[in-house]
Structures are given as structure tokens and as C-alpha cells.
Image (spheres, rainbow, N blue to C red):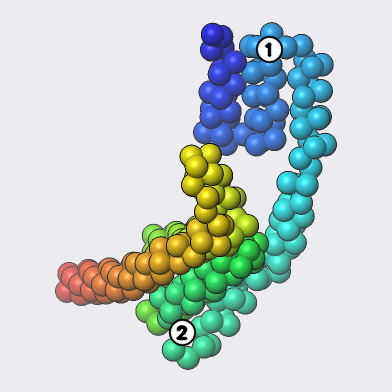
Amino acid sequence: MNYWPLIGVAALALGFVLRLNPALVVVAAGFITGLAAKISPLEVLEVLGKAYTEKRFLLLFLLTLPVIGLLERHGLKEHAQRWVARLRGATMARLLIAYLLMRQLASAVGLTSLGGHPQTVRPLLAPMAEGAAQANHGDLDEDTRQRIRAMAAGTDNVGLFFGEDIFIAFGAVLLIQSFFTEHGLTLDPLHIALWGIPTAICAFVIHCIRVLRFERAMVRRLAQQRAAETAALADQARDA
């Protein structure tokens, strides 16, 4: 067996580690793999072109990126932070829990594109969570902001992953059905999807607890930092 074509995988990983242009990295890795497999450059171009024309519908999501970029350029994050800061009773935990519920319910009926990291978490959810935390607990340091963004992204992941398992047309549900069919067991997709509901409920409860614990730990950490800063200022004042 010829293992040399696998060098393209190493080239792909190296390009991403060096943070080179993703498109150039992928194309270069394709040529490296093709040459290692003794395929001519023209044949590699043919394969790339055929794959592009057959799967070009997958690039439709790229249309949303310029729109999100323009919105961010004109202050979408700042507006989201100011808006959530004006809401009474809005906390970071309540906001994330509400989004988790919405994300799971939408995914359960197949509306998986209503959320997501590029179109919802980065421009809206994370800034709103930061704004709620800042409105309730004062200024945030960079480490705390990064932690909040990570929790917002994780909330989206949990909502999508455990919500879409309830949708009967989801690929995983159909895969489970085909697996059991091959082994002589006939199961209805609806029956399989219904058994995803208890898992989704457990995931919702567990992640809600994680979010609440995260907020409590954040409050304690901020209080300790401010106490340390106050003590340092007091020491400086005494020394002066």
C-alpha cells in the first residue's frame, strides 16, 4: 500500500498551524496528494473542478459572512451589548439558558440554521452575554471575556447537538435506522427520534447547571481580583 499520498494531510495541518490562507492551503495539499499518488497536475485540476461544480451549494453559507462583517463594522456588537444592558433582570446565565432552550427547540424541528457560531454566537450572543455580565458585575478583564465567549459557543453546540437528534429527518437518526435494518430490526425514525427527547432534556438541565456554576465562579473571581487590586492600591498609598 502506498502511504505517500497521506503527506497531503500533513501539509494541510502544517498550513493551518502556520495560519496561511486556507484556500491556498487546501489547493496546495490537493496537489501534493495528487503528485504523491502519481496523478498529473491537469488531472488534479480536473478533480478539484469537478468537486467544486458538484458541491458548490455548500458554499452558500459564505454569502452570510460579508453581511455579518458589514454589521460588525457598523457596531452590531456594541448595539447588542448596550441593548441587553438596559434589560432589567437580564443576567449572563439567564440569557444563555434562554438561548439554549430556543436552540434546542428550533433544532428539534429541523431549523438548525437559525443559530450557529458565525451568524449568531460571534455577532450577537457572545456580545450580549458580555454586556449582561458587565451590567451586573462591572468591568470585565480580557480573560473573563474570553471565557464568556467560550461558554456562549459551547451553549450553541449543546443546543444544536442534542436538539437535532429529535428531528426525524436528521442524518444520525436515519443512520441508526439503517444500521438496525441491516441487522434485522425494523425501527420507525419517529420512534428513534422520540428516544432522543430524554437525552435532550438531560443535556439541557446539565448545561443549565454548568452555566449557573460558571457565572457564580466568575463573580467570585472578579471579586477576588478587585479585592487584590484594592489591597495593592492601599499598600501603595501607605508607602507614599
Between 78 and 28, the one nearer to me in the picture: 28
Between 216 and 236, the one nearer to me in the picture: 216
Left or right for 111, reference 209: right
Q: Is residue 159 visible?
A: no
Please, is residue 31 above or below residue 62 in the view? above
Kindly identify the residue that appears in the image at 52 percent across and 88 percent down: 87
Nearer-N-terminus badge (2/1): 1
Helix, strand or loop at disc 1?
A: helix
Left or right for 59, reference 102: right
Q: Mark 1 highlights which residue?
A: 35
Please, is residue 240 above or below residue 164 in the view? below
Where residue 7 appears, as percent x and y from the top left, is 56, 18
Kindly identify the residue that appears in the image at 66 percent across and 30 percent down: 26
Helix, strand or loop at disc 2?
A: loop
Q: Mark 2 highlights which residue?
A: 90
Where residue 132 appears, as percent x and y from the top left, is 46, 78
Q: Is residue 197 visible?
A: yes
